[in-house]
Image: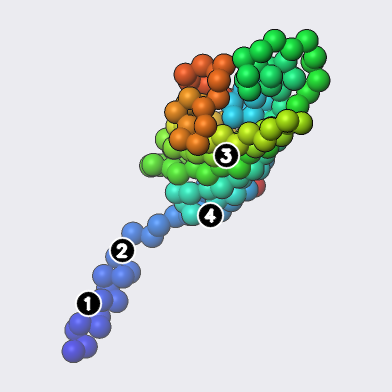
Amino acid sequence: MRWVFFLLLGWGALAPAQADGPRQKEKNLISLEVLGRGGYGSIQYDRAIHRKFSVGAGVGAVTATTYAVVRSLTSVTSTQVEPWYFMYANYYLAGEYISPFVTGGAIYIPSNTKVDLTLWPGAGIEFRTHVGPTLRITFYLPKASPIGTVPGWPEIWSGLTLGYCF
């Protein structure tokens, strides 16, 4: 019976140690996204819940002209900036430092006449380090949204995210 104990103990000692990846140690990411789900640009925060899963929120902005065109395909002369609020989740398919991922999130677009809520699915790749810079390239599919299309947007909308993880 002792040999079983020593066999298990020896097997545990020989098993490779799993190092913590960047999403396990530096769970927080603050970033700026050019274009992307926030319109012309956005600021966002996300937190890794697991080495393969993170959730986040942010705020972006578009001018009222773009906002009106997006909502109703009509022409507007105002250039007032309108906020977009969004929440999202990322699921990382593989890797720790270079990680392809799929994403989805709800975008809340306030308006005086109507409240729009749209889901933007997408996919991309993330380049992440331990404490320090992070880069994401994401391709969104706004017209593939199951809870509402975004009229006036192209079939594929891309975003470039630059951030800092800590």
Marks 3 and 1 in Cβ contact (< 8 Å): no
Return the residue at label 2.
Answer: 15
| Relative to 45, residue 153 above or below | above
- Looking at marks 4 and 3 on the same chain, the residue that comes earlier in the sequence is marked by 4
Mark 4 burial class by Cα count in 10 Å: few <14, some 14-19, many 20+: few
Residue 32 lies in quadrant: top right
Give, as a three-letter code, the residue at label 1: Leu
Q: Nearer the viewer, mark 2 or mark 3?
A: 3
Instruction: Measure the C-alpha gap from mark 4 to mark 1.
Output: 35 Å
Which percent across, then down, holds residue 49? 53, 54
- Residue 60 placement, left or right of 13: right
Query: Whole-Å distance between the Cαs marked 4 and 2?
Result: 26 Å
User: Callout 4, which amino acid?
Assistant: Ile
For label 3, the residue is 106
Residue 163 visible in image: no
Q: In the rendered structure, which amino acid carries the disc numbered 3?
A: Ala
Q: Within 10 Å of the Cα at label 1, are there few (<14), some (14-19), or many (20+) other Cα atoms? A: few
Left or right, 52 with reference to 78: left
State the CA–CA distance, disc 2 to disc 1.
Answer: 12 Å
* Residue that mark 1 sits on: 7
The residue tagged 4 is 49
